[in-house]
Amino acid sequence: MELNPFLSVWTQPKETVRQFIKHNKLGYSMLLVSIAGIGGVLTTLQDSGWFQDLSFRCGLLGY
């Protein structure tokens, strides 16, 4: 039975990786890596304090 990678990566990460390796699904792999990268960037921006000045920056741009 194939796992849904978007759900199983959270509940069964080892089995999901094994399935990727077995079936060589590069497209799904790149999508999941991209999603993880976006999360990492948002976490880094939050830790740096970038979001604290976001309302001021949007005000300058007229949003």
Image (tube, rainbow, N blue to C red):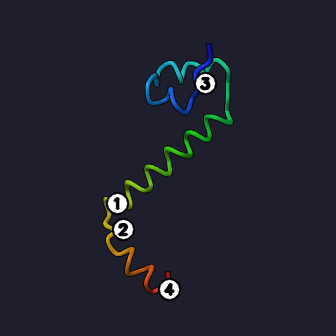
Q: CA distance from mark 1 to mark 3?
A: 31 Å
Instruction: Please report whichever mark, 4 or 1, sits nearer to the chain's N-terminal start.
Output: 1
Instruction: Please report whichever mark, 4 or 2, sits nearer to the chain's N-terminal start.
Output: 2
Q: Could you classify mark 4 by the number of other residues whose Cα lies within 10 Å: few (under 14), some (14-19), or many (20 or more)? A: few
Instruction: Please report whichever mark, 1 or 3, sits nearer to the chain's N-terminal start.
Output: 3
Tag 3 near tag 4, CB within 8 Å = no
Q: Could you classify mark 3 by the number of other residues whose Cα lies within 10 Å: few (under 14), some (14-19), or many (20 or more)? A: some
Instruction: Say what amino acid the circle numbered 4 marks.
Output: Gly
Q: CA distance from mark 3 to mark 4?
A: 45 Å
Instruction: Please report whichever mark, 3 or 4, sits nearer to the chain's N-terminal start.
Output: 3
**What residue is at 55 percent from the left and 33 percent from the top?**
6
Task: Tell me the SS state at disc 2.
Answer: helix
Q: CA distance from mark 4 to mark 2?
A: 17 Å
Tag 2 near tag 3, CB within 8 Å = no
- The correct choice, above or below, for 39 with respect to 61 in the image is above
**Label 4: which residue?**
62
